[in-house]
Structures are given as C-alpha cells and as structure tokens.
C-alpha cells in the first residue's frame, strides 16, 4: 500500500512538473540564432518579432547574429544547440538552397530541425546604385549591361544564398554576364551598394525598402508577375520582359530536433500571436512582405518543395561550393 502511494505521488509530481513547464515557457530569455550579420533582410523581420515576443511574454527573445557561408555557419550552430526550448533558429530561403549548393554540410535542415512557422514572404528586387548606373529604367539598364559583359558587378549575401542564385537566374534569363561579389551577409552587401563599392544587388524587398524610399538606391524591378503594393511604381519582372523570373525570399523559424513538444506549441502560439498584432502587420506591409497561414506540417512540405525547386536552378547555373 505504501509503495503504491509512493508511485502515485511520484507520478503526480512528474505530471505537475510537466504541466508547470508547459505553462511557464518561456521561464527565461530565449535565444534566436540569426545566421547572418546584423542589418540584413533576416534582421528586418527578426528584430520587430523579438520586440513583440518580449511584449507578449515578458521574456526577451535575444537575437544572436552568426553570419558566414551563406547562412550555413549559423544553421550548424543552431542545430547543435541544447534542445531545451530556449534556442530557436530563424533561417530563410537560403537554407533550402544550401543542400544542393554545398558539397559538405554538417547539418540537415529537414532532419536536424523542427519547422515551427513561416513568418514572412517578400519578393526579390533588383536594386542599383544610381551613381554607378545612372539609368532611368530596366530597359536602359539592360542595354548598358549587354554592351559591357563583366564590367558591372552584383553583390550577394554570400555564395549559395538567394541573392546569389537570383543573380545567376537573372543572367541566364536576360542573357547577360555580371560579375558576382559575395559578402558575409546581406547587411554588408547592402551597405557597400549604398556606398557605391558595388553596382547592384538582387535583394529581398524587406531589407532594401528603406534605402529605396530614401533614394540611396534605385529599384528597377520586383520579381514575379505583379507589382508590390509597397512600391507600386516599380515594375514586375513580367512587365520588363522576364515572365519566368520568379524569386521570393522567405523567412521561417525552426527549433532544434528534440525540443520538447510543449515548448514547440507555446512558441508557435506566441509567433502566431505576434504576426497577427497590428504592430507587426504595419511593419510587414511597409516592407512589402506577406504573411503566411501555414501550419508546421505545411511549412515542412513547403521547405521540401523549395529544396527541390532550387536544386534545378543550382544545376542550371553551374554554381557549387565546398
């Protein structure tokens, strides 16, 4: 009888402890690994999300920028973090490109992470430094580029990122040659574009938006077949004669494999609540970003399809990294 009572009390204590953990997460600050330097497109969404998370939960969502190798360094670090619910990872489309771009990766984005939420989708935009390329529109730009193959260059957030592949895809479809200059993140690449050290960038609209509005860089087109509501004066790729040029930058949040289910559930709920807040809706709209209503299962399927889609582009471009 005494043994049975002990077992009951022990089970009860374990249940109570588990229930309390589920109710208390986050009980301390949560680290969000962002695999790019500060100031890039991922930061443009991670930092407002971090502020809203803190407002909702009373606990910090600490941004940990770990740039390098097209986002794969930060992804590797996050994949090896303790799966206790207090480390999350904010990756992007680059992490669907990496499996076919890099010959060696020490993590698997589909096996070593648990997809939680797709938080933003933005079109790619072709932006130029107007002093380096004083052109009025895409037609004039194309004429100059075709007259001087290799003279002009485009920056990227690193080899194997969507910025890089967007440039390679543009070269294929426009039948041009532009020199690729990789950086350690979109932030430094964008900074040098503004400063005139590079000529152009195929960027996510979110990180370029403020500089376009400020006149420091000029947008020549957005990818896809429709204009962005945030920049209605910028023509779409279809309008400038590139009907098949569709490139989007998306950002999502994962947890390391093994993260407790209760922490996953609470994290998903808090992210969803933040994305539905008026504050984030206004910020997303100003950057030309769309929201996603995908659940984690749909997000996982989306990632798998993106990996397959980008593998075709990588193969066509001939790009490969060690």
Image: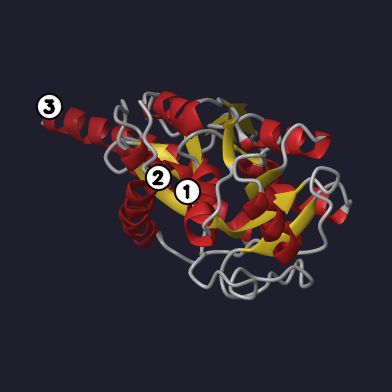
Residue at 32% x, 54% y is 312
Q: CA distance from mark 1 to mark 2?
A: 7 Å
Instruction: Name the residue beneath numbered marker 2.
Output: 97
Which tag, 1 or 3, sits closer to the chain's start? 3
In the picture, measured across the screen, residue 64 lies left or right of residue 221, that is left
The answer to whether the residue labelled 1 contacts the one labelled 2, judged by CB atoms less than 8 Å apart, is yes
The answer to which of 86 and 311 lies nearer the viewer is 311
Quadrant containing the C terminus in the rendered view: top left
Instruction: Name the residue beneath numbered marker 3.
Output: 3
Residue at 44% x, 39% y is 20
The answer to which of 140 and 87 lies nearer the viewer is 140
Q: Tell me, for residue 93, which label it has, or none.
A: 1
Residue 211 in percent (x, y) is at 82, 48
Quadrant containing the N terminus in the rendered view: top left
Q: Residue furthest right?
A: 214
Residue 198 in percent (x, y) is at 72, 36
Query: In this orientation, does residue 204 appear?
Result: no
- Local packing at callout 1 (Cα closer than 10 Å; few below 14, some 14-19, many 20+) is many
Which tag, 3 or 2, sits closer to the chain's start? 3
Q: CA distance from mark 3 to mark 2?
A: 57 Å
């Amino acid at each position: 009888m005494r043994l049975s009572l002990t077992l009951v009390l022990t089970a009860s204590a374990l249940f109570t402890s588990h229930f309390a953990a589920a109710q208390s997460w986050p009980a301390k600050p949560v680290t969000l690994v962002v695999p790019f330097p500060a100031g890039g497109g991922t930061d443009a969404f991670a930092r407002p999300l971090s502020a809203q998370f803190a407002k909702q939960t009373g606990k910090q969502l600490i941004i940990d920028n770990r740039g390098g190798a097209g986002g794969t360094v930060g992804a590797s670090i996050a994949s090896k973090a303790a799966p206790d619910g207090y480390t999350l990872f904010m990756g992007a489309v680059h992490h669907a490109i990496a499996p076919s771009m890099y010959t060696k990766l020490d993590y698997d984005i589909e096996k070593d992470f648990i997809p939680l939420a797709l938080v933003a989708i933005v079109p790619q935009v072709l932006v130029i430094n107007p002093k380096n390329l004083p052109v009025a529109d895409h037609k004039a730009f194309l004429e100059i580029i075709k007259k001087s193959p290799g003279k002009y260059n485009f920056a990227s957030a690193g080899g194997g990122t969507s910025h890089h592949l967007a440039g390679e895809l543009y070269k294929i479809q426009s039948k041009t040659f532009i020199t690729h200059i990789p950086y350690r993140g979109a932030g430094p690449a964008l900074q040098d574009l503004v400063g005139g050290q590079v000529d152009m960038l195929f960027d996510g609209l979110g990180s370029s938006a403020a500089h376009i509005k400020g006149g420091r860089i000029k947008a020549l087109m957005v990818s896809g077949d429709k204009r962005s509501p945030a920049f209605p004066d910028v023509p779409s790729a279809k309008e400038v004669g590139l009907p098949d040029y569709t490139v989007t930058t998306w950002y999502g949040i994962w947890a390391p494999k093994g993260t407790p289910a209760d922490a996953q559930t609470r994290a998903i709920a808090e992210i969803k609540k933040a994305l539905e807040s008026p504050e984030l809706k206004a910020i997303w709209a100003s950057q030309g970003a769309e929201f996603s209503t995908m659940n984690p299962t749909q997000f996982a399927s989306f990632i798998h399809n993106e990996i397959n889609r980008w593998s075709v582009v990588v193969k066509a471009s001939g790009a490969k990294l060690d």
